[in-house]
Image (cartoon, rainbow, N blue to C red):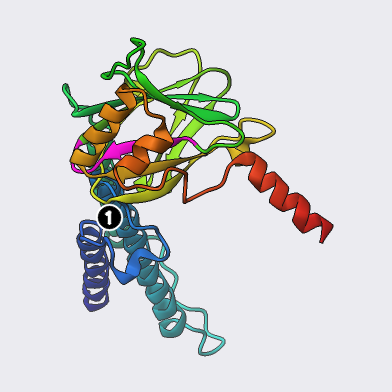
Amino acid sequence: MARRSKLAKVAGLGLLGALTLSGCELTGSWVSWGWPEGITDQAEAMHDLWIGSTIAALVVGIGVWLLIAYATIRYRKRGDELPRQTAYNLPLEVVYTIIPFLIIAVLFFFTVNTQNEVRDVSEDPDVTVAVNAFKWNWQFVYPETETESGEAVSTVGTSTEIPILVVPTDRTIRFELASADVIHSFWVPEFLFKLDIIPGQDNGRDNVFEVTVREEGAYVGRCAELCGTYHAFMNFELRSVTPDEYETYLEAREEGLSSYDALVLIGEPGEAVSTEPFLLQREQQAVASDD
């Protein structure tokens, strides 16, 4: 009975540690293990879920290793006498059936909560951006704007120019994704989130997500789905600026300024600074191969 009591205590401590760590605030701590710092509210929630789950798994794993070591040492062979044989141990079987179920239930609870938070879409976002993916570049359209020609402000990438997606900080931003050809995937690593863009679907629940960006800066964006020959060069740049700068940028675009000139107007670099266009990368590769 004493051994069973000790075993139950160890199992209980392991479960308590898993439950506690899975709900900790871990963003920016040493346990990030190389994960990038998220720049959105949603990224923070996903970061905590992933790192918390990893630590919970380590806690459970260490507990199992300790139990294995204890059994190995405590019940090691000490002679030629056959140890006492036991057909079953009902209390122990109940414990190691219930504990895994509880761990899975807790992880499921936190996963569903985080998923609902990340995929939640508001009825009236502050900003809406239509993201159109095509082989092998991006177009970003601001449907709530209108230029002198009556069209919405848009930015399209080319082989010589990286498209820059300008968004404001501290605002709810809705991305409506669409593909013109094959399956692409919209990915900004600092979002800690990616969403596949499946062609042939209207912009609906499956192709829509929202974020609130909290940090200003320039961040590379990529296609995370193998979409063809030049998939590796299908990059864009997310440029997050203050709300006032964002409004000034859109007003300048509506008046006819290019994306380059409008960015310079608000004090930002007119070209991408986080990645390079396709042709420049090819030229650099050619020079490197010649050397």
Q: Disc 1 residue type?
A: Asp
Give the residues drawn in magenta, as a range.
Answer: 163-171
> Residue 86 in the image: x percent, y percent?
41, 67
- Tell me: residue 70, above or below residue 44: below
Percent of width and height locating residue 231: 62, 36
Quadrant of the image occupied by residue 243? top left
Percent x, y for residue 200? 49, 12
Which quarter of the rendered picture does the C terminus lie within?
A: bottom right
Residue 29 seen in this snapshot? yes
Residue at 37% across / 66% down in the picture? 58
Q: Going by the image, does 280 lie left or right of 61?
A: right
Task: Residue 151: name its quadrant.
Answer: top left
Q: Residue furthest bottom?
A: 79
Q: Is residue 75 above or below residue 291?
A: below
User: Residue 32 vs residue 237: left or right?
Assistant: left
- Given residues 234 and 147, the one toward you in this image is 147
Point out the residue furthest to the right here: 290
Where is residue 56? Give x, y as percent: 31, 61
Identified at 25% across, 57% down, the residue is 22
Residue 116 appears in the rendering: no
